[in-house]
Amino acid sequence: MSAEKLLETVFAGELRELMVLSYIVLGNNAVTNRCIERRFGMPVQAWSALYAIGTFPGIRAKEIRQLFPRPQNTISRAVTLLEGRGLVVQKISPSDAREKLLFATKSGKEMLSQLIEVSRDRQEEWLSPLTPDERSMFFELARKVATGPNLLCSTVMTR
Amino acid sequence: MSAEKLLETVFAGELRELMVLSYIVLGNNAVTNRCIERRFGMPVQAWSALYAIGTFPGIRAKEIRQLFPRPQNTISRAVTLLEGRGLVVQKISPSDAREKLLFATKSGKEMLSQLIEVSRDRQEEWLSPLTPDERSMFFELARKVATGPNLLCSTVMTR
DNA sequence: GCCAATTCAATCCAAATGGATCAATGTTTT
DNA sequence: AAAACATTGATCCATTTGGATTGAATTGGC
């Protein structure tokens, strides 16, 4: 059976919304992660963390988790990598010595702007099937789902 | 800074579409994978493969890859696991002895129907912020992106 | 002020991941 | 029809992952 036919059937099933979103994100990740890995020698985790740190100077590790729902030690390792390459610096929080405030260095900011540029180009590419109106509608609906109360805390999947 | 404030800012940035979709899928996976892992003792890969096999009896391993963009050996291992538990059987293809046609057994079908049920409940949960109209609009737009030509083959991220 | 409980981030380690290779089968070329 | 090439799926193995633990710092109860 052809790939189109398989997808068409799955996208007509009961789990269509789950399937189609997973397909977009997994498919895009397969392309993007590999490319960024090669070009910048850095796993997604690390560039996600760099993005968070560049966008929010002084952000704490635990706050990065709220933006990118990944395990805690993943963030910890990503930050260690970024610090090792001189892309970010950590400063002990004046109010709480357990917390480390994260800042991008000059070279971190430079790398981040390259990362954002290529990611934006890539994003335009996979969004190209949508008209500008469709695109903003799509984003708004996705935002509504993302900020809904049940995405990260489930009642049907207890524990 | 609060989680809401952080998300609001990221969802206003240049990469908002990428961020919001990744957030939905990563966040949902964190909840869902862990629950399914505990309840059915099976990684996502395996249940994805079981879903594909149950939906398309006689599907080949390479075709499962087209539905779930994962590395080839991931599918191979998932199928081995499913076979080891008696949830699927492999039959050598009559037309090509390299290919193995996959079929769900009775117990495989039973487990699949349970998996689909809990996944459907979970899907209803995270989609609950949308009205029925918004939901079908969201799906249609996502489908358009998923079946677009550039999702899996990029020109801006060459190698 | 002291001790238990809590929070933050680093580290540990068993298990999973995925790129590369391999063996088996099928297809194409000459 | 033999040899070169291609495709399918399993396996190898170095790297990564993530749940659990640890250690350091803070908070809360008394």
Image: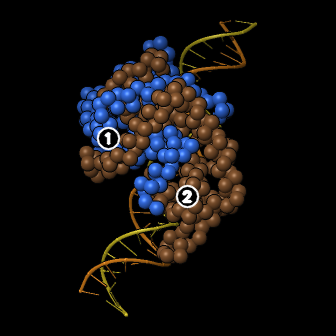
Chain colours: A blue, B brown, C orange, D yellow
Residue at image mark 1: A129
- The residue depicted at 57 percent of the width and 47 percent of the height is B44
For this rendering, which residue is in front, B1 or A3? A3
Same-subunit check for callouts 1 and 2: no
- The residue depicted at 38 percent of the width and 41 percent of the height is B144
x%, y% of residue A140?
Answer: 40, 26
Kind of residue at badge 2? Phe
Q: CA distance from mark 1 to mark 2?
A: 28 Å
Left of B103 or right of it: where is A103? left
x%, y% of residue A27?
Answer: 41, 47
Badge 1 element = loop
Is residue A142 depicted above or below A21 in this figure? above
For this rendering, which residue is in front, B148 or C15? B148
Is residue C7 depicted above or below B96 in this figure? above
Chain to which mark 2 belongs: B
Kind of residue at badge 1? Pro
Left of D13 or right of it: where is B110? right
For this rendering, which residue is in front, B75 or A107? B75
- The residue depicted at 26 percent of the width and 48 percent of the height is B155
- The residue depicted at 47 percent of the width and 12 percent of the height is A95
